[in-house]
Image (cartoon, helix red, strand yellow):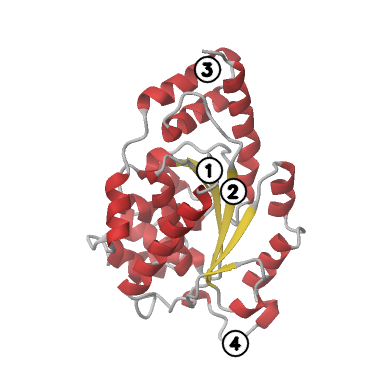
Amino acid sequence: MSQALRHVIDSISPASAAHAEGARLRLASAGLPTLERLAAQLGGAQHASRVRSARRTIATVIGDHGAGDPGLSLGPDHPSVIAARAIADGTAALATIARTTHTPIVIVDAGARESAHLPAAAIRLGRAATRNLLREPAMTVVDATLGLDAGLALAISLSEPGLDLLAIGAIGLGSEVSTAALTAALTGDTSATEVEAAQHGLALRGSGALEILAAAGGAETAVLAGLILGAASINVPVILDGPATCAAALVATAFAPHVPGYLIAAHNGAPAIVHRLGLTPVFEVGLGHGEGTGAAMALSLVDQVAAVCLDQRG
Protein backbone atom coordinates (compact mmCIF):
# COMPACT_ATOMS: atom_id res chain seq x y z
CA MET A 1 0.00 0.00 0.00
CA SER A 2 1.36 3.42 -0.93
CA GLN A 3 1.95 6.17 1.60
CA ALA A 4 -0.60 8.36 -0.19
CA LEU A 5 -3.27 5.69 0.11
CA ARG A 6 -2.47 5.10 3.77
CA HIS A 7 -2.68 8.83 4.48
CA VAL A 8 -6.06 9.11 2.75
CA ILE A 9 -7.48 6.06 4.54
CA ASP A 10 -6.38 7.43 7.91
CA SER A 11 -8.01 10.80 7.14
CA ILE A 12 -11.52 9.41 6.49
CA SER A 13 -13.69 10.16 9.51
CA PRO A 14 -17.29 9.02 10.08
CA ALA A 15 -20.00 10.99 8.32
CA SER A 16 -21.53 13.58 10.64
CA ALA A 17 -24.68 12.30 12.36
CA ALA A 18 -25.42 15.80 13.69
CA HIS A 19 -25.25 17.39 10.25
CA ALA A 20 -27.28 14.53 8.77
CA GLU A 21 -30.07 15.23 11.25
CA GLY A 22 -29.79 18.98 10.66
CA ALA A 23 -30.18 18.51 6.91
CA ARG A 24 -33.07 16.10 7.40
CA LEU A 25 -34.92 18.55 9.62
CA ARG A 26 -34.73 21.21 6.91
CA LEU A 27 -36.96 18.99 4.77
CA ALA A 28 -39.03 17.40 7.52
CA SER A 29 -41.97 19.77 7.02
CA ALA A 30 -42.12 19.10 3.26
CA GLY A 31 -43.66 15.64 3.70
CA LEU A 32 -41.29 14.08 1.16
CA PRO A 33 -39.61 11.08 2.81
CA THR A 34 -37.34 10.27 -0.15
CA LEU A 35 -35.92 13.79 -0.22
CA GLU A 36 -35.70 13.86 3.56
CA ARG A 37 -33.65 10.67 3.57
CA LEU A 38 -31.46 11.95 0.75
CA ALA A 39 -30.89 15.20 2.61
CA ALA A 40 -29.65 13.26 5.64
CA GLN A 41 -27.25 11.22 3.49
CA LEU A 42 -25.87 14.32 1.77
CA GLY A 43 -25.65 16.45 4.91
CA GLY A 44 -23.83 13.75 6.83
CA ALA A 45 -21.31 13.24 4.01
CA GLN A 46 -20.73 16.96 3.46
CA HIS A 47 -20.58 17.65 7.21
CA ALA A 48 -23.03 20.49 6.60
CA SER A 49 -26.73 20.88 7.40
CA ARG A 50 -27.26 23.02 4.29
CA VAL A 51 -26.72 20.65 1.37
CA ARG A 52 -24.69 21.87 -1.64
CA SER A 53 -24.99 20.52 -5.18
CA ALA A 54 -23.85 23.21 -7.62
CA ARG A 55 -20.34 21.91 -8.20
CA ARG A 56 -20.53 18.33 -9.35
CA THR A 57 -19.05 15.94 -11.90
CA ILE A 58 -19.92 12.58 -13.42
CA ALA A 59 -16.89 10.31 -13.84
CA THR A 60 -17.31 7.27 -16.10
CA VAL A 61 -14.36 4.89 -15.80
CA ILE A 62 -13.57 2.29 -18.47
CA GLY A 63 -11.85 -1.02 -17.79
CA ASP A 64 -12.16 -4.28 -19.73
CA HIS A 65 -11.65 -7.63 -18.04
CA GLY A 66 -9.83 -10.69 -19.31
CA ALA A 67 -12.85 -12.76 -18.28
CA GLY A 68 -14.88 -10.91 -20.92
CA ASP A 69 -12.25 -10.73 -23.67
CA PRO A 70 -13.81 -11.81 -27.00
CA GLY A 71 -10.46 -13.25 -28.11
CA LEU A 72 -9.96 -11.00 -31.12
CA SER A 73 -9.43 -7.31 -31.74
CA LEU A 74 -12.70 -5.49 -32.37
CA GLY A 75 -11.12 -2.07 -32.85
CA PRO A 76 -13.70 0.73 -33.01
CA ASP A 77 -16.49 -1.88 -32.81
CA HIS A 78 -15.57 -2.92 -29.28
CA PRO A 79 -18.62 -2.41 -27.02
CA SER A 80 -16.64 -0.31 -24.53
CA VAL A 81 -15.44 1.98 -27.33
CA ILE A 82 -18.96 2.34 -28.74
CA ALA A 83 -20.35 3.23 -25.31
CA ALA A 84 -17.58 5.76 -24.61
CA ARG A 85 -17.96 7.42 -28.01
CA ALA A 86 -21.72 7.76 -27.53
CA ILE A 87 -21.10 9.58 -24.26
CA ALA A 88 -18.46 11.82 -25.83
CA ASP A 89 -20.54 12.73 -28.90
CA GLY A 90 -23.63 13.42 -26.81
CA THR A 91 -25.90 10.66 -28.14
CA ALA A 92 -25.87 8.43 -25.04
CA ALA A 93 -28.67 8.69 -22.48
CA LEU A 94 -26.06 9.66 -19.89
CA ALA A 95 -24.97 12.63 -22.00
CA THR A 96 -28.56 13.79 -22.46
CA ILE A 97 -29.33 13.64 -18.74
CA ALA A 98 -26.01 15.32 -17.90
CA ARG A 99 -26.93 18.22 -20.19
CA THR A 100 -30.31 18.68 -18.53
CA THR A 101 -28.69 18.72 -15.08
CA HIS A 102 -25.80 20.94 -16.24
CA THR A 103 -23.23 18.37 -15.11
CA PRO A 104 -19.87 17.81 -16.84
CA ILE A 105 -18.80 14.25 -17.67
CA VAL A 106 -15.23 13.01 -17.33
CA ILE A 107 -14.38 9.82 -19.26
CA VAL A 108 -11.44 7.89 -17.80
CA ASP A 109 -9.57 5.08 -19.55
CA ALA A 110 -8.44 2.92 -16.64
CA GLY A 111 -7.71 -0.14 -18.79
CA ALA A 112 -9.69 -0.39 -22.02
CA ARG A 113 -9.00 -3.30 -24.38
CA GLU A 114 -9.08 -0.99 -27.43
CA SER A 115 -7.70 2.16 -25.86
CA ALA A 116 -6.49 3.63 -29.16
CA HIS A 117 -10.08 3.90 -30.41
CA LEU A 118 -11.53 5.74 -27.42
CA PRO A 119 -12.61 9.38 -27.87
CA ALA A 120 -9.83 11.93 -27.65
CA ALA A 121 -11.43 13.48 -24.57
CA ALA A 122 -10.80 10.37 -22.47
CA ILE A 123 -8.27 10.72 -19.66
CA ARG A 124 -5.78 7.94 -20.33
CA LEU A 125 -4.07 6.38 -17.33
CA GLY A 126 -1.86 4.08 -19.37
CA ARG A 127 -3.05 0.81 -17.84
CA ALA A 128 -4.03 -2.31 -19.76
CA ALA A 129 -7.11 -4.53 -19.64
CA THR A 130 -6.87 -7.08 -16.84
CA ARG A 131 -6.17 -10.80 -17.16
CA ASN A 132 -8.81 -13.52 -16.81
CA LEU A 133 -9.40 -13.74 -13.06
CA LEU A 134 -10.82 -17.25 -13.42
CA ARG A 135 -7.41 -18.50 -14.55
CA GLU A 136 -4.93 -16.23 -12.78
CA PRO A 137 -4.86 -13.04 -10.69
CA ALA A 138 -6.48 -10.23 -12.68
CA MET A 139 -3.71 -7.80 -11.70
CA THR A 140 -0.50 -7.72 -9.74
CA VAL A 141 -0.56 -6.01 -6.37
CA VAL A 142 1.56 -3.27 -7.95
CA ASP A 143 -1.03 -2.75 -10.72
CA ALA A 144 -3.83 -2.57 -8.15
CA THR A 145 -1.87 -0.06 -6.05
CA LEU A 146 -1.16 2.12 -9.07
CA GLY A 147 -4.85 2.08 -9.97
CA LEU A 148 -5.85 3.12 -6.45
CA ASP A 149 -3.30 5.93 -6.47
CA ALA A 150 -4.55 7.09 -9.89
CA GLY A 151 -8.07 7.28 -8.46
CA LEU A 152 -6.84 9.31 -5.50
CA ALA A 153 -5.06 11.71 -7.82
CA LEU A 154 -8.18 12.04 -9.97
CA ALA A 155 -10.28 12.86 -6.89
CA ILE A 156 -7.89 15.62 -5.89
CA SER A 157 -7.80 16.97 -9.45
CA LEU A 158 -11.59 17.08 -9.71
CA SER A 159 -11.87 18.80 -6.33
CA GLU A 160 -9.37 21.59 -7.03
CA PRO A 161 -11.97 23.99 -8.52
CA GLY A 162 -14.38 22.92 -5.76
CA LEU A 163 -16.56 19.81 -5.67
CA ASP A 164 -19.85 19.30 -3.84
CA LEU A 165 -20.86 15.96 -5.30
CA LEU A 166 -19.44 13.17 -7.45
CA ALA A 167 -21.45 10.68 -9.52
CA ILE A 168 -19.64 7.64 -10.92
CA GLY A 169 -20.24 5.01 -13.57
CA ALA A 170 -18.28 2.16 -15.15
CA ILE A 171 -17.92 0.61 -18.60
CA GLY A 172 -16.18 -2.67 -19.38
CA LEU A 173 -16.65 -6.18 -20.73
CA GLY A 174 -16.50 -8.86 -18.05
CA SER A 175 -17.30 -6.55 -15.15
CA GLU A 176 -20.15 -8.82 -14.05
CA VAL A 177 -17.65 -11.64 -13.49
CA SER A 178 -15.39 -9.42 -11.42
CA THR A 179 -18.34 -8.06 -9.43
CA ALA A 180 -19.50 -11.57 -8.54
CA ALA A 181 -16.01 -12.56 -7.41
CA LEU A 182 -15.46 -9.40 -5.39
CA THR A 183 -18.88 -9.65 -3.75
CA ALA A 184 -18.23 -13.24 -2.65
CA ALA A 185 -14.71 -12.42 -1.47
CA LEU A 186 -15.75 -9.39 0.58
CA THR A 187 -19.20 -10.42 1.83
CA GLY A 188 -19.48 -14.19 1.44
CA ASP A 189 -22.55 -13.75 -0.79
CA THR A 190 -22.50 -16.26 -3.65
CA SER A 191 -25.99 -15.62 -5.06
CA ALA A 192 -24.69 -14.09 -8.30
CA THR A 193 -25.55 -15.77 -11.59
CA GLU A 194 -21.81 -15.93 -12.33
CA VAL A 195 -21.43 -19.09 -10.21
CA GLU A 196 -17.82 -19.92 -11.10
CA ALA A 197 -16.72 -16.36 -10.37
CA ALA A 198 -18.56 -16.36 -7.05
CA GLN A 199 -16.91 -19.61 -5.99
CA HIS A 200 -13.55 -18.22 -7.07
CA GLY A 201 -14.16 -15.15 -4.95
CA LEU A 202 -15.24 -17.23 -1.98
CA ALA A 203 -11.81 -18.86 -1.98
CA LEU A 204 -10.32 -15.40 -1.38
CA ARG A 205 -12.29 -14.82 1.85
CA GLY A 206 -10.02 -13.62 4.63
CA SER A 207 -7.40 -12.13 2.31
CA GLY A 208 -6.46 -8.46 2.58
CA ALA A 209 -8.34 -5.82 0.62
CA LEU A 210 -5.40 -5.12 -1.69
CA GLU A 211 -4.87 -8.80 -2.43
CA ILE A 212 -8.58 -9.32 -3.18
CA LEU A 213 -8.64 -6.29 -5.48
CA ALA A 214 -5.58 -7.56 -7.36
CA ALA A 215 -6.91 -11.11 -7.69
CA ALA A 216 -10.51 -10.39 -8.66
CA GLY A 217 -10.91 -6.71 -9.48
CA GLY A 218 -10.55 -4.73 -12.66
CA ALA A 219 -8.46 -1.75 -13.62
CA GLU A 220 -11.61 0.36 -13.34
CA THR A 221 -12.37 -1.15 -9.92
CA ALA A 222 -9.03 0.07 -8.59
CA VAL A 223 -9.43 3.57 -10.02
CA LEU A 224 -13.03 3.86 -8.80
CA ALA A 225 -12.11 2.61 -5.32
CA GLY A 226 -9.33 5.20 -5.15
CA LEU A 227 -11.72 7.87 -6.42
CA ILE A 228 -14.25 6.95 -3.71
CA LEU A 229 -11.60 6.98 -0.98
CA GLY A 230 -10.28 10.34 -2.16
CA ALA A 231 -13.76 11.86 -2.26
CA ALA A 232 -14.64 10.56 1.22
CA SER A 233 -11.44 12.02 2.63
CA ILE A 234 -12.56 15.53 1.60
CA ASN A 235 -16.23 15.10 2.56
CA VAL A 236 -17.59 14.74 -0.96
CA PRO A 237 -20.57 12.35 -1.30
CA VAL A 238 -20.40 9.81 -4.13
CA ILE A 239 -23.44 8.55 -6.05
CA LEU A 240 -23.04 4.93 -7.16
CA ASP A 241 -24.55 3.55 -10.36
CA GLY A 242 -24.69 -0.17 -11.10
CA PRO A 243 -22.90 -3.31 -9.91
CA ALA A 244 -19.37 -2.34 -10.99
CA THR A 245 -19.36 0.92 -9.03
CA CYS A 246 -20.96 -0.84 -6.06
CA ALA A 247 -18.19 -3.46 -6.18
CA ALA A 248 -15.62 -0.66 -6.13
CA ALA A 249 -17.42 0.81 -3.11
CA LEU A 250 -17.12 -2.58 -1.36
CA VAL A 251 -13.39 -2.54 -2.01
CA ALA A 252 -13.07 1.04 -0.72
CA THR A 253 -15.02 0.07 2.41
CA ALA A 254 -12.65 -2.85 2.99
CA PHE A 255 -9.85 -0.30 3.17
CA ALA A 256 -11.75 2.30 5.20
CA PRO A 257 -14.88 1.23 7.15
CA HIS A 258 -16.32 4.77 7.34
CA VAL A 259 -16.71 4.98 3.54
CA PRO A 260 -20.43 3.98 3.39
CA GLY A 261 -21.33 7.23 5.15
CA TYR A 262 -20.19 9.04 2.00
CA LEU A 263 -22.09 6.85 -0.47
CA ILE A 264 -25.49 7.17 -2.10
CA ALA A 265 -26.94 4.32 -4.17
CA ALA A 266 -28.80 5.77 -7.14
CA HIS A 267 -30.77 2.56 -7.61
CA ASN A 268 -31.01 -1.07 -6.59
CA GLY A 269 -29.04 -2.56 -9.47
CA ALA A 270 -26.81 -4.52 -7.07
CA PRO A 271 -29.11 -5.47 -4.17
CA ALA A 272 -26.66 -7.66 -2.26
CA ILE A 273 -23.96 -4.98 -2.24
CA VAL A 274 -26.33 -2.09 -1.54
CA HIS A 275 -27.71 -4.01 1.45
CA ARG A 276 -24.23 -4.89 2.67
CA LEU A 277 -23.19 -1.24 2.55
CA GLY A 278 -26.29 -0.28 4.52
CA LEU A 279 -27.60 2.02 1.81
CA THR A 280 -31.18 2.85 0.82
CA PRO A 281 -31.34 3.41 -2.95
CA VAL A 282 -32.87 6.60 -4.29
CA PHE A 283 -34.76 4.54 -6.88
CA GLU A 284 -35.88 1.01 -5.96
CA VAL A 285 -35.42 -0.37 -9.48
CA GLY A 286 -32.31 -0.99 -11.58
CA LEU A 287 -31.52 1.73 -14.10
CA GLY A 288 -29.32 1.47 -17.19
CA HIS A 289 -26.08 -0.43 -17.52
CA GLY A 290 -24.10 1.29 -14.78
CA GLU A 291 -22.22 3.76 -17.00
CA GLY A 292 -23.56 6.64 -14.91
CA THR A 293 -27.10 7.16 -16.22
CA GLY A 294 -28.79 6.15 -12.97
CA ALA A 295 -26.46 8.32 -10.92
CA ALA A 296 -27.12 11.25 -13.25
CA MET A 297 -30.88 10.77 -12.84
CA ALA A 298 -30.48 11.09 -9.07
CA LEU A 299 -28.90 14.53 -9.48
CA SER A 300 -32.26 16.19 -10.13
CA LEU A 301 -33.46 15.00 -6.73
CA VAL A 302 -30.23 16.23 -5.15
CA ASP A 303 -30.91 19.66 -6.65
CA GLN A 304 -34.38 19.67 -5.10
CA VAL A 305 -32.88 18.87 -1.70
CA ALA A 306 -30.32 21.65 -2.07
CA ALA A 307 -32.99 24.13 -3.17
CA VAL A 308 -35.18 23.41 -0.14
CA CYS A 309 -32.18 23.64 2.18
CA LEU A 310 -31.27 26.99 0.67
CA ASP A 311 -34.79 28.30 1.23
CA GLN A 312 -34.66 27.35 4.89
CA ARG A 313 -32.97 30.22 6.72
CA GLY A 314 -31.02 29.81 9.93
- Compared to residue 31, the image places residue 213 above or below, namely below
Query: Does residue 42 appear left or right of residue 80 in this picture?
Result: left
Residue 73, percent across and down?
Answer: 61, 86
Seen in the image, is 309 located left or right of residue 156?
Answer: right
User: Of the residues tagged 1 and 4, which is closer to the observer?
Assistant: 1
Q: Residue at x 50, y 66 (%)?
A: 175
How far is mark 1 from mark 4, CA to CA?
41 Å
To which residue does mark 1 refer?
163
Residue under pointer 4: 72
Looking at the image, can residue 241 be seen?
A: no
Which residue sits furthest front? 161
- Residue at numbered disc 3: 26
Q: Earlier in the sequence, mark 2 or mark 1?
A: 2
The picture places residue 135, in percent across and down from the top left corner, at: 37, 80
Q: Which residue is farthest bottom?
A: 72
Between marks 3 and 1, how big is the CA–CA gap? 22 Å
